Image (cartoon, rainbow, N blue to C red):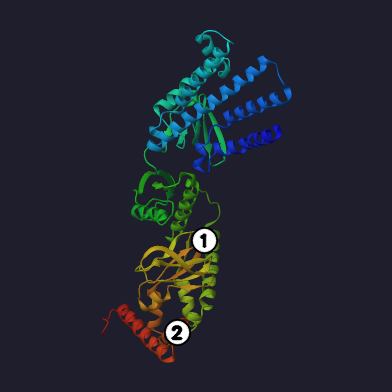
Amino acid sequence: MIVARLVPLFLLLVLTFPIGKAKSRPQDPRLRWLPSMRILRWLLIARITQLFNEAYLHLNADLTSWVVIINGVVVSLLVLDLAIDYSWLLMYAAGGSRNTPPKIFRELLFLSGCSVIIGYALYSSGAISGWGTAAGASVLAFVIGPGTSSQLQNLASGLSIQLEKQFVVGDWIEFEGMLGQVTSISWSNTTLLDDLTDRNIIVANSRIDQAVIVNHSRSSPFFRVAVAVGLPYEMRPECAHELLVEAVQSHGNVIMAKPIEVVLKTFSASSIDYELYFYIRDYCRRYQVLTDVRSRIWYGVQRRGFTIPFPIVDLRPISTERRLAEAELTSQRQECFVALRSLALLAPLCDEELRCLAISERVIMYGVGEYIIAKNETDRSMYVLLSGECDVLVPSDQDEGPMRKVAMLSKGALFGEMSAFTDSPRSASVMASTSVSLLKISQQSIQQIFVHNEKALEGIVELIAKREAGLKAFTAVQTRDLEDSLLAQMGATLRRFLGYGADD
């Protein structure tokens, strides 16, 4: 019979350890409503000791009375802990962390209650006489330590921090070169979580109380971050402003409703130095966001034909540098020609015409997440994907709602040709899913070729019509009508290019 009573208590005692660990880092906020596992363990141990004494130990009357006293004290402490914890949880639910009394008040209240409960239990049992002695003995039972001046200073600083609410648990603070999220504030120290290295930083309260603290969480639920970058003197400031703002647009963690600011900081020896300020939602992801934005800035600079400047002393002869640049340009043009020649849509064009396109157009690059084409935009260029992959996106619900992926483009793909040939608006968006390099062919270059090669124009119209007809299962008559329609649209585009009206 006694075993049947002891086994559940032992199992419950063992369970308090994983539950206590989960309660200290709650994944489920409901765990906060559980009682203190430490006091519950005392209660279980006291109850198990009492049962062992009744069944096996048979201690003398004095020791047995002490076991009973300890059981009563622990039960009272558990009730006190639950009452205080639930009161603080209710105040937190009503007013939030900043309107809830500091944690140190809760601990002082619990300590005072412990003093009264233990003192009363000792006084009632006759172990001590006088309430002053009882209170002093109970405090000594909980406050252990030499009481040095540094500990008293930490205690005073902890009280000051929590009373003034310079920061609360969950805030991101920075001081003396350390940055972290506050995970706990105790009597003697404060614990910060450094998410970059995934480690805890434990700092004495007296040190924090004397430091200059930057609280990144106080002003708003959003976080302002900065990116410093040096751009070439050849780039006009308005172009630099456009490039930097473009680098944060369409990023999922950047709050576009908040102001984006570009500050021209100084003129340095090698560059014009700018600082880009913007707001993010999740401060834990700031390093990834800053990496993404810096990568986009690099790609944006490259697309505009510049390079990010840096101090350099080049001892190579100018002729050597020039030969290397010419060799790289020749290799790039040959790669572009091979890519153009492999496209079935451009088969009606001769090699010379394709080489002209490869020479006259520029290779540009985009980073992950950047939009190459946006739906309904006015640019009418077409693109050949030389490396990387892109996603074709359309709105989920007509022109509104989130974008959904309908296709993936890989190396060698041609896209944007319908707008380039027919002057029609973009029907979808194309976003780089990896780092990509592209040959961007302007509508003007295409039109210059077809002005002198009407036969090639007819061949391309036929290929486009057959492709569209195959996708939509058109009949031969419908295919022919589509060819006529495309030819008319391309003709109108060419007439506009030559400076004639649509009806001339």
Farthest residue toward the top?
A: 129
In the rendering, at what x and y percent does residue 212 appear?
43, 29
Quarter of the rendering occupied by the N terminus: top right
Report if the CB atoms under discs 2 and 1 are less than 8 Å apart.
Answer: no
Residue designated by label 1: 435
Closest to the observer: 277 or 198? Answer: 198
Callout count:
2
Label annotation for residue 101: none
Whole-Å distance between the Cαs marked 2 and 1?
33 Å
Say few, some or many: other residues with alpha carbon within 10 Å of mark 2 (under 14 / 14 to 19 / 20 or more).
some
Is residue 287 in view? yes
Closer to us: 108 or 135: 135
The mark closer to the camera, 2 or 1, is: 2
> Which is nearer the N-term, disc 2 or disc 1?
1
Position of residue 473 in the picture relative to residue 41 (left or right): left
Which residue is disc 2 drawn over? 469
- Residue that appears at 41% across and 43% down: 223
**Mark 1 residue element:** loop
Q: Say which quadrant the C terminus sits in.
A: bottom left
The image quarter in which residue 167 lies: top left
Residue shown at 36%/85% (left/top)? 485
Q: Position of residue 270 (x, y in %)?
A: 44, 47
Q: Is residue 480 above or below residue 2?
A: below
Mark 2 residue type: Ala
Q: Nearer the viewer, residue 136 or 13?
A: 13
Q: Is residue 295 left or right of residue 21?
A: left
Q: Nearer the viewer, residue 369 or 503?
A: 369
- The type of residue carrying mark 1 is Ser
Q: Is residue 70 above or below residue 231?
A: above
Q: Secondary structure at mark 2?
A: helix
